[in-house]
């Protein structure tokens, strides 16, 4: 990966104080991204409330150096600014990619291993974006600048991006020239169960990896477009970097902050969708009735309650929804909601750092589970990290980068890695855990092959 060093000089952080908004006819956000998909720092993020965001041409990019993590985002955002009413939650600000290994900077006892291809934290500040609301079929162009005139100019510039959108033919056939099968997973699961029996941990989220290379002429955007059509996910995202790209088909929210209200939605418990309505309903009922899956979910809910309690007002952390069934294109999941109210003086970035990496992809106790994971996995890079936006009003929305492909451009073409994992508990069955990872990776492998 070419180094995405901060070669884009930062303008003053307070230069986005004024805002302008322009309406546009509906266009599909993936089609709108296509003309710019190979442009460094082009991004498309799906998120909560039905909104998606297309961003280009950041005014500042920062690869965060060790020791400056806590100050990095507030410094790049600058003074907080009210946002326009009756507009999308994100109206300009910062998009960030936090690799899983950022955890080593946050907790002294976390495993300190890294993938040199992926920085721990990349932040990019954008002065303009297109916001798409799928349910309402509307598009807004938003510009931010030091003056109203500059903000309107940037909004009009963003509006012009839509004129380049096309409905180009989709490539047929395999996107991958080669996909290497993962090593055995069952043995790692069995050993982890033994560690649980010995009292080392209660749960650990182990993952398998599939690696390969894209076929000649295929691009990361081809994969993103195909996944968007075949297996849409609420937190799907695309981020192009110099010499690298992240393609995510994630269904999972890590953290959302609006004002002082913070929420996380951990996922634990999975069954495949059935081939017909009867088998689909049976799979869903089996998941809801599974004591093992509910216990797995409850452990992570307790962990996330503890993480949020580090930055929330005493007594404010609640669980309004526990192990609820949510159905997606390829799988059923058990999803919980944990909510809290930030303590005085605490920010969305404080909450992000307090809870990172997400409990649903580490285990319990978190730090000890991370050490177990490091015994079986190479550095994860973007996988199980987070892609997020941070607004100029202090709001934040972050995904968990599961169902995610990390791609690095090399001499032989685009090399990729995708992983799928699951929570291992005392009564896990190694063969069933292997089958669960096959279910979770199926949409990605189907799009590639």
Image (tube, rainbow, N blue to C red):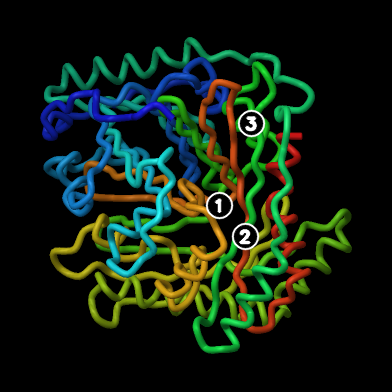
Residue density around tag 3, few if under 14, some if 14–19, many if 20 or more, within 10 Å? many
Q: Residue at x 58, y 27 (%)?
A: 414
Q: Residue at x 18, y 63 (%)?
A: 346
What SS does tag 1 mark?
A: loop
Residue 223 tag number: 3
Q: Is any part of residue 427 visible from this angle?
A: yes
Q: Quadrant of residue 183?
A: bottom right
Please provide percent x and percent y for residue 343: 20, 70
Q: Nearer the viewer, residue 341 or 171?
A: 171
Marks 2 and 1: in contact by CB < 8 Å?
Answer: yes
Q: Earlier in the sequence, mark 1 or mark 2?
A: 1
Q: Which residue is mark 2?
A: 421
Neighbourhood count class around disc 1 (C-alpha, 10 Å): few under 14, some 14–19, many 20 upward? many
Q: Which mark is residue 4?
A: none
- Is residue 20 in view? no
Local secondary structure at mark 2: strand
Q: Position of residue 214 (x, y in %)?
A: 66, 27
Image location of residue 380, percent across then percent down: 49, 51
Q: Residue 142: which quarter of the image?
A: top left
Which residue in the structure is indicated by mark 1? Answer: 402
Rate crowding at label 2 as few (under 14), some (14 to 19) or many (20 or more) other CA atoms within 10 Å. many
* Labelled pair 3, 1 in contact (Cβ < 8 Å): no
| Vertical placement of residue 15 versus 353, above or below | above
* Residue depicted at x 37% and y 40%: 88
Residue 167: x and y in percent read: 63, 15
């Amino acid at each position: 990966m070419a180094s995405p060093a901060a070669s884009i000089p930062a303008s003053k952080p307070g230069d986005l104080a004024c805002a302008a908004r322009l309406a546009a006819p509906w266009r599909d956000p993936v089609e709108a991204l296509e003309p710019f998909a190979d442009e460094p720092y082009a991004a498309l993020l799906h998120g909560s409330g039905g909104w998606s965001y297309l961003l280009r041409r950041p005014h500042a990019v920062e690869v965060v150096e060790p020791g400056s993590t806590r100050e990095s985002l507030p410094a790049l955002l600058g003074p907080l600014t009210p946002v326009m009413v009756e507009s999308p939650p994100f109206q300009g600000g910062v998009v960030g990619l936090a690799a899983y290994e950022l955890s080593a900077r946050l907790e002294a006892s976390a495993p300190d291993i890294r993938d040199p291809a992926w920085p721990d934290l990349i932040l990019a500040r954008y002065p303009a974006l297109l916001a798409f609301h799928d349910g309402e079929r509307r598009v807004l162009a938003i510009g931010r600048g030091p003056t109203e005139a500059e903000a309107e100019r940037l909004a009009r510039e963003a509006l012009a991006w839509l004129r380049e959108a096309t409905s180009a033919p989709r490539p047929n056939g395999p996107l991958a020239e080669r996909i290497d099968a993962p090593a055995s997973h069952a043995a790692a699961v069995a050993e982890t169960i033994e560690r649980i029996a010995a009292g080392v941990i209660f749960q650990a989220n182990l993952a398998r990896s599939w690696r390969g290379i894209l076929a000649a002429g295929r691009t990361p955007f081809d994969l993103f477009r195909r996944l968007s059509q075949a297996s849409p996910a609420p937190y799907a995202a695309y981020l192009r970097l110099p010499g690298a790209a992240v393609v995510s088909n994630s269904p999972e929210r890590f953290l959302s902050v609006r004002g002082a209200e913070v929420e996380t939605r951990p996922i634990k418990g999975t069954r495949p969708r059935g081939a017909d309505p009867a088998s689909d309903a049976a799979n869903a009922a089996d998941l809801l009735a599974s004591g093992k899956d509910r216990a797995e979910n409850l452990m992570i809910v307790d962990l996330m309650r503890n993480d949020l309690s580090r930055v929330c007002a005493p007594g404010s952390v609640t669980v309004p929804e526990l192990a609820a069934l949510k159905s997606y294109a390829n799988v059923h999941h058990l999803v919980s909601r944990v909510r809290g109210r930030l303590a005085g003086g605490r920010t969305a970035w404080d909450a992000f750092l307090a809870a990172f990496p997400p409990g649903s992809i580490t285990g319990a106790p978190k730090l000890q589970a991370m050490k177990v994971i490091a015994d079986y996995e190479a550095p994860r890079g973007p996988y199980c990290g987070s892609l997020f936006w941070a607004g100029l009003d202090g709001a934040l929305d972050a995904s968990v980068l599961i169902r995610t492909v990390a791609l690095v451009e090399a001499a032989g073409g685009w090399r990729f890695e995708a992983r799928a994992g699951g929570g291992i508990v005392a009564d896990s069955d190694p063969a069933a855990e292997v089958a669960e990872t096959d279910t979770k990776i199926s949409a990605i492998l189907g799009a590639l092959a």
